Amino acid sequence: MRRPVVAACASLLLLGAAACDARTPTDVLGPTPSAVASAPTSIAEHESGPQTPIAYGLEVPEGATQLGPLVRLRSERLLAAYRPALDAALAQQEAAEAAQRAEAEESGEPIPTPAPTPETQPGRDTFAPIGTPPRPDTTIAVLRIDEDPTEALRLMIGQMNAVVPGAGLVTDDIGRYCEDEDGRVTSCRVEARGLTSDGRDVRLVVTADPGDAATRTGRAASRQSPVMTVTAEYVGDPRSGQVERETSTVQVPRSIDGEDRSGLIWPRMDLDAPSPEGLPFEWETPQQTTVLLSGVGPTFVAAAADRVRGADELAERFASGVGEPEVDVVEDLNEITTAYRSVDADGNVAVAAYVLSARGNYALMFYVPEGSTGPVDEGPIEPLGAAADDDR
């Protein structure tokens, strides 16, 4: 059962493209019982192409495809900053309701009861009682790289330099940001922290996961292609980040001059994994659900569900597999995101987001083992300039 308390969702930090063939999830994952029974629609219906906006001027690069919606969440810092105001508003609301009930009892009138929220609809924004809920400060996109992964990664590095002018990231040597074995890429992570042109303190993180080179197996639903995540987060003062500012349009580069000199190659995959990997429990594709993409490092699963309740239950059950989840509901733009966060006794973290949008019903689920450098960062953010820069 969903906990009725106001809760925090962790900030997700560490965490299209050329025409895709018309394969269905059955082609990618094999004829699993759930896939056959629910006859899911084509994954292409949930794809977004190059130049699709992400945040702060970042966009889906050429050669990549975004799967599912953007995930927009409130960080722990933002929740902590506004929780006192929420607690006060809830206390005032409770007192007003108690007075209304007492007045009704005294007059012999029916005692008013709040209208229940339909089970097929998400709840109101968690911070609705304060009048103006804080806007999400964290945005995550999950992408499949369909063309040259080196060029797609270099394009994202160029974009990061444009959004954070002082980042100074190298664009002609992905070896600065990628781990490898015998010259074959095993994982990549690029981070930029600094001020945007309009003075916003942000952190940008891009990761790339080529799959399991040892077994030549791509991640589930990856179509044997590398998987990329892009996270953009405001990390300055939480309240200052809510103030509207005059922003100039960032002209992110859509091409990169020169050649990459790392000499690294991306291992070719022969097939996709039959199910998402890296999770703390056995996970199978539920009925009427389509896996859109998955990855390891960071470990995540993005899925689309035929029904609203199905996507919500999928996200909640995922977080419940680690511990009792806390909840934060965000109404942002034309989407409603219900975030579930749980932490077990060992410090392992699960964050799952159910996103209700005009395009469909989605669940995006992340798992971070204790001590991992995965997509959920539980630590505080140091003031800008407090630590030495490290382009690794």
Image: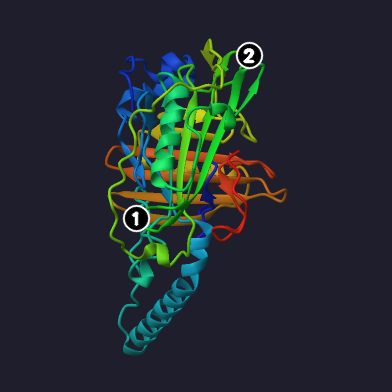
Residue underneath mark 1: 331
As rendered, which of 216 and 239 lies closer to the eye? Answer: 239
Q: Position of residue 231 (x, y in %)?
A: 46, 43
Determine the residue located farthest toward the front in the rendered image: 258
Badge 2 or badge 1: first in the primary sequence: 2
**Residue 261, placed above or below residue 1:** above
Quadrant for the C terminus, please: top right
Rendering quarter of residue 267: top right
Question: Alpha-carbon distance for marks 2 and 1?
Answer: 42 Å
Rendering quarter of residue 306: top left
Residue underneath mark 2: 215
Instruction: Say whether residue 25 is visible.
Output: yes
The crowd level at tag 1 (other Cα within 10 Å; few <14, some 14-19, many 20+) is many
Secondary structure state at the residue bearing disc 1: strand
Q: Position of residue 177 (x, y in %)?
A: 57, 32
Determine the residue located farthest toward the right in the rendered image: 346
